[in-house]
Image: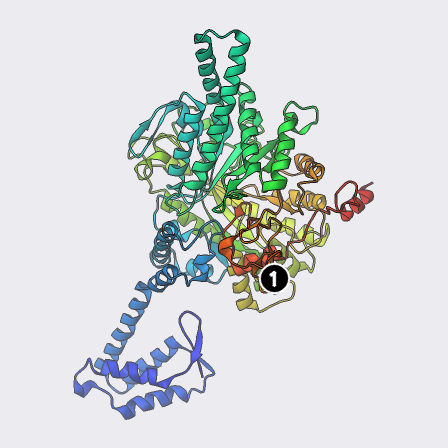
């Protein structure tokens, strides 16, 4: 007989465990209330005579209580019940100890690979993880209903960031209102920071603001370089004044002022880059930061902004030195380059910046590209205005502003009436639905599929409501830099943030994962087939949006569909599917599931077809989405990079190119570090397998990871196929499949 324990593990039946438990209870009651050894053996025999192949441990305990009662041993039965209850309390109250011990000893695979930008051996990261383990335990036992915890454990849904949920003050990601904080002053740790008068000073203050903000939330944050451009002009004016005062003639004044200004911009950007990558937030890592480069955000300071963008790109191309003094690709900040008419046309004034961006992408994987043209087609605010703005962190997009009729509810000092507001807004959190589980649970019955889908969506809805309600208790005092000093708002002390959770000011995200596996199981086709698979996939996506729209109207909360960047969860979902449904070829036989709406990584498809196809699904993922293509080394093939960039501008809102940027510290090899059949990373030049001396950078889920990954994500990275053909005999450097598809279109 096998015994099924409370955590689902199956163990061998050991009768002595029953006798030991009863004897312990025996010792706690008077002698006349005890049972004899023979009676204990009879109880055990009674259980065994059930002739069960498997029994739940709870069922065995119920039988013991019943038999003790039948023997008239009521005091003993009561004592056994008390013993059983006490053991249950111990189990529930002490769930963190082993996880913490394994973390500290470096024995816990989950925490060692939980985040590819965190090193779990470093004390600052361990401190964050220990707090996270405790938070997760509190969340599971006290803050979430049992059915949501059970669904999370079984991989039916994923309740994100439970390791931060115990603190009700923390939210996900945001666009920092850096303009307000720099122009009107701010306060960090009780120290007043006044408006800077030089670019270099503004850059230094910006890094301090970013670190403080990142420490008061758990998701990514984004700033725009537009907010720093005015300080370039301030610095130039100071240099002009200096040289005029010295009596230089006009041409020399301009010449020397520009020389000094360029030096200051170089120093300022370098300071910013080094500060961001060397500082550690309370989350145990460098700030999870994205930097937006959008010339269309300003008319007055466009030339100054172009100078900053150029310097950022040049310094990222160079990279940052590792411990061996070799330039490598840093993970942060993530760069977001907005494509627009002035920088995408060859005769455009800022086309040179796009060419520089292409060079940077080929070398360092960033910047990523946002199409102003496509975004303005998709993002329309309540007054009919068409807006373009960056994502928060790696992919989370705000909904178009619908708060204009409410006025300045955040009390920002740079509020402009009648203009869509994006900087200073945020996301409340994410709960993700496992789409393949919905499909597999339906056993290919379409009616059952939609029924289960709705049940799971309501489960996600209740979980999201819990996230929202927990945040709704927060007052501005819990994070002054966020709520009182301009990052998001300038509320009064003690003022509730409740209004900022409603009316479309912030979003809350319904995540989804595994569209490919869901569609493949239900239809037998990929959602990339331009036929029944694609049609069903779009219906699934629309159903997610319909649910969010229904909830939004009922509650005045901006629910939004979000293509989840599942990192460690891709492995968890895959293993849960295998446990629940077994290994089904082409569906559950890998240790990962496909991210969001993406074409599966192993499917042969050319870059342009992939981006065009995914653009249709990206429209139905308004709360967050990013597409990518895998490329070979394109540093000597920038024409192809430019061709892809132009295609992005005309066809898809947000996309990136995944190049390779690795380094082996033992032999100096700077080509691609490979993965063997055992999912171990190695240098193909010298065979080095030591993670400590291998610098590997890979796009994980929209952002770059540099600290290696769990088994599932590593398998996914290994199976990625290239979407660009870089062979010399192909004159236009695009894949042969793309040429074929172009001919068919004609």
Q: Is residue 689 left or right of residue 610?
A: left
Q: Residue furthest front?
A: 667
Count of numbered circles in the view: 1
Residue 102 location, quadrant: bottom left
- In the figure, is residue 687 to the left or right of 157? right
For the residue labelled by badge 1, is the local secondary structure a helix, a strand or a loop? loop
Height in image: 277 above or below 160?
above
478 left or right of 719 in image = left
Between 191 and 662, the residue placed more toward the observer is: 662
The spot of residue 648 in percent (x, y) is: 66, 37
Quadrant of residue 251 within the rendered picture: top right
Place of residue 275 in the rendered image (x, y in percent of width and height, measured from the top left): 43, 37
Residue hosting label 1: 676
Residue at 51% in and 48% down: 510
Nearest the viewer among 131 and 530 is 131
326 and 493: which is toward the camera: 326
Q: Is residue 457 visible?
A: no
Quarter of the picture containing the C terminus is top right
Residue at 17 percent across and 87 percent down: it is 31
Callout 1: few (<14), some (14-19), or many (20+) C-alpha neighbours within 10 Å? few
Where residue 110 appears, as percent x and y from the top left, is 45, 60
């Amino acid at each position: 007989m096998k015994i099924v324990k409370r955590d689902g593990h199956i163990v061998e039946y050991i009768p002595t465990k029953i006798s030991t438990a009863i004897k312990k209870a025996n010792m706690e009651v008077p002698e006349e209330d005890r049972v004899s050894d023979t009676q204990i053996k009879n109880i055990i025999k009674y259980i065994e005579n059930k002739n069960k192949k498997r029994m739940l441990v709870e069922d065995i305990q119920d039988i013991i209580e019943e038999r003790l009662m039948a023997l008239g041993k009521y005091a003993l039965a009561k004592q056994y019940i008390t013993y059983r209850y006490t053991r249950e309390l111990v189990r529930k109250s002490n769930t963190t100890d082993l996880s913490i011990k394994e973390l500290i000893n470096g024995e816990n695979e989950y925490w060692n690979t939980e985040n590819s930008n965190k090193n779990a051996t470093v004390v600052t990261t361990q401190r964050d993880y220990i707090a996270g383990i405790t938070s997760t335990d509190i969340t599971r036992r006290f803050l979430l209903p049992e059915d949501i915890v059970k669904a999370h454990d079984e991989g039916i849904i994923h309740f994100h960031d439970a390791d931060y949920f115990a603190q009700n003050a923390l939210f996900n990601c945001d666009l920092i209102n850096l303009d307000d904080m720099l122009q009107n002053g701010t306060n960090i740790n009780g120290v007043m920071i006044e408006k800077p008068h030089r670019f270099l000073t503004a850059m230094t203050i910006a890094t301090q603001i970013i670190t403080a903000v990142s420490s008061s939330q758990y998701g990514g944050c984004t700033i725009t370089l537009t907010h720093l451009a005015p300080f370039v002009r301030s610095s130039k004016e100071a240099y002009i004044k200096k040289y005029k005062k010295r009596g230089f003639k006009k041409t020399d004044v301009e010449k020397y002022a520009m020389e000094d200004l360029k030096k200051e911009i170089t120093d300022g950007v370098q300071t910013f880059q080094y500060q961001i990558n060397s500082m550690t937030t309370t989350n145990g890592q460098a700030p999870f930061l994205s930097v937006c480069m959008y010339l269309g955000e300003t008319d007055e300071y466009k030339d100054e902004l172009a100078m900053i963008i150029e310097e950022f790109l040049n310094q990222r191309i160079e990279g940052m030195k590792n411990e061996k003094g070799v330039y490598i690709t840093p993970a942060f900040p993530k760069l977001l380059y907005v494509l627009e008419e002035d920088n995408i046309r060859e005769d455009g004034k800022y086309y040179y910046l796009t060419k520089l961006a292409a060079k940077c992408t080929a070398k360092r994987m960033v910047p990523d590209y946002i199409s102003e043209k496509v975004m303005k087609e998709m993002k329309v605010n309540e007054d009919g205005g068409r807006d373009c703005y960056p994502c928060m962190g790696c992919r989370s997009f705000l909904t178009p502003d619908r708060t204009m009729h409410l006025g300045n509810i955040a009390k920002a000092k740079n509020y402009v009436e009648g203009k869509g507001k994006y900087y200073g807004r945020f996301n409340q959190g994410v709960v993700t639905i496992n789409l393949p589980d919905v499909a597999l649970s339906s056993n290919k019955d379409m009616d059952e599929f939609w029924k289960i889908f709705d049940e799971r969506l309501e489960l996600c809805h209740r979980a999201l409501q819990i996230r929202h309600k927990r945040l709704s208790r927060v007052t501005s005092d819990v994070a002054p830099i966020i709520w009182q000093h301009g990052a998001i708002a300038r509320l009064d002390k003690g003022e509730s943030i409740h209004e900022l959770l409603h009316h479309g000011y912030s979003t809350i995200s319904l995540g989804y994962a595994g569209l490919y596996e869901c569609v493949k199981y239900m239809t037998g086709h990929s959602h990339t087939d331009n036929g029944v698979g694609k049609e069903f996939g779009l219906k699934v996506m629309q159903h997610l949006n319909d649910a969010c729209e229904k909830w939004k109207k009922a509650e005045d909360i901006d629910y939004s569909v979000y293509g989840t960047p599942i990192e460690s969860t891709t492995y968890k979902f895959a293993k849960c599917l295998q446990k629940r449904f077994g290994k089904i070829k082409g569906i559950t036989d890998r240790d990962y599931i496909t991210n969001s709406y993406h074409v599966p990584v192993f499917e042969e498809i050319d870059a342009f077809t992939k981006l065009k196809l995914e653009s249709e699904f990206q429209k139905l993922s308004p709360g967050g989405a990013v597409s990518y293509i895998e490329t070979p080394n394109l540093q000597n093939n920038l024409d192809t990079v430019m061709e892809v960039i132009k295609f992005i501008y005309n066809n898809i809102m947000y996309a990136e190119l995944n190049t390779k940027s690795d380094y082996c510290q033992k032999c100096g090899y700077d080509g691609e570090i490979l993965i063997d059949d055992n999912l171990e990373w190695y240098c193909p030049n010298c065979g080095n397998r030591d993670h400590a001396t291998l610098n590997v950078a890979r796009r994980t889920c929209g952002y770059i990871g540099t600290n290696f990954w769990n088994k599932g994500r590593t398998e996914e990275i290994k199976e990625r196929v290239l979407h660009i053909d870089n062979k010399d005999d192909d004159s236009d450097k695009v894949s042969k499949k793309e040429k074929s598809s172009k001919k068919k279109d004609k």
